[in-house]
Image: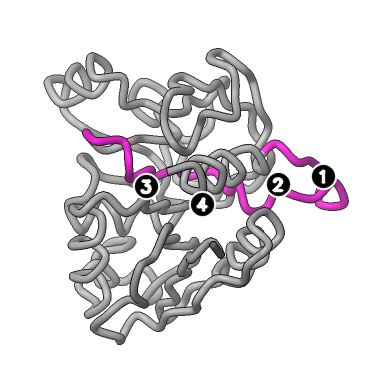
């Protein structure tokens, strides 16, 4: 059975094509392309990706306006029903603003735009998204963000840590994120938000393939399911 995925596009998205290409390369099937103004998702989806970019020009707060787009009600409903959802960069911001993940993404600690490949440590390799990595493995994934500084209060951070919901940490200082959080899972493990761009690390000609295992893990896990 073909892998059925969808990539959402908002006004200002600029990584939606990159995400679609990565998903097609790994799964062998092109994803559905869904405009944010749609009220419904395609039926029987296996995977939903909320890509990076600058939705609505980052007005108000990054991801805040996109989180109120019509399609987000359908995405929240799908996530609550167990459909895997990946939010990358602006997509991570959208997931926090929509309540699918806790916390918030704030302005980078040094108030600058960070654009480089960074080392990440795999903290949890037991999720659908991270099963292709070893726990503690260092991988290298590009980042490109201005508002990637993850924040939650200490009680929330302790709960997140205790529940094993940190998927990836920055292995060096990048943006001031609390506890170096680079990727975060929801309580049931079917939603992942991360600031680094795994879709930009699936071809050697782009500088590395450390992002491939994330997509492959999800595709293989869902095919087995």
Tell me where residue 74 sits by quadrant: bottom left
Q: Are marks 3 and 2 in contact (CB under 8 Å)?
A: no
Q: Marks 1 and 4: which is nearer the front?
A: 1
Residue at the disc numbered 2: 201
How much space separates mark 2 and mark 4, taking CA atoms?
16 Å
Residue at the disc numbered 3: 107
Q: Marks 1 and 3: which is nearer the front?
A: 1
> Where is 2 relative to 135, above or below?
below
Q: Position of residue 157 (x, y in %)?
A: 22, 23
Q: Are marks 1 and 3 in contact (CB under 8 Å)?
A: no
Q: Residues within 10 Å of mark 2 (few under 14, many from 20)?
A: many
Residue at the disc numbered 1: 207
Label 2 SS: loop
User: What's the colour scheme?
Assistant: one colour
Q: Marks 3 and 4: which is nearer the front?
A: 4
The quarter in which the N terminus is drawn is bottom right
What is the span of residues highlighted in magenta in the rendered image? 187-210
């Amino acid at each position: 059975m073909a892998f059925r995925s969808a990539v959402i596009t908002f006004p200002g998205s600029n990584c939606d094509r990159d995400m679609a290409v990565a998903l097609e390369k790994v799964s062998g099937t092109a994803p559905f392309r869904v405009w944010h103004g749609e009220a419904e998702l395609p039926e029987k989806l296996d995977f939903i990706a909320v890509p990076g970019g600058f939705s609505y020009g980052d007005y108000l707060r990054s991801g805040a306006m996109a989180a109120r787009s019509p399609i987000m009600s359908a995405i929240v409903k799908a996530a609550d029903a167990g459909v895997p959802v990946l939010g990358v960069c602006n997509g991570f911001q959208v997931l926090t603003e929509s309540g699918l993940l806790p916390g918030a993404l704030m302005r980078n600690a040094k108030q600058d735009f960070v654009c480089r490949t960074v080392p990440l440590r795999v903290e949890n390799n037991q999720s659908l998204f991270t099963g292709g990595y070893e726990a503690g493995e260092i991988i290298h994934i590009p980042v490109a963000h201005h508002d990637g500084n993850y924040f939650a209060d200490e009680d929330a951070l302790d709960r997140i840590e205790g529940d094993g919901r940190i998927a990836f940490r920055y292995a060096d200082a990048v943006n001031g994120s609390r506890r170096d959080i680079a990727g975060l899972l929801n309580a049931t493990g079917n939603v992942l938000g991360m600031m680094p761009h795994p879709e930009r690390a699936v071809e050697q000609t782009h500088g590395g393939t450390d992002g491939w295992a994330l997509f492959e893990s999800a595709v293989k896990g869902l095919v087995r399911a």
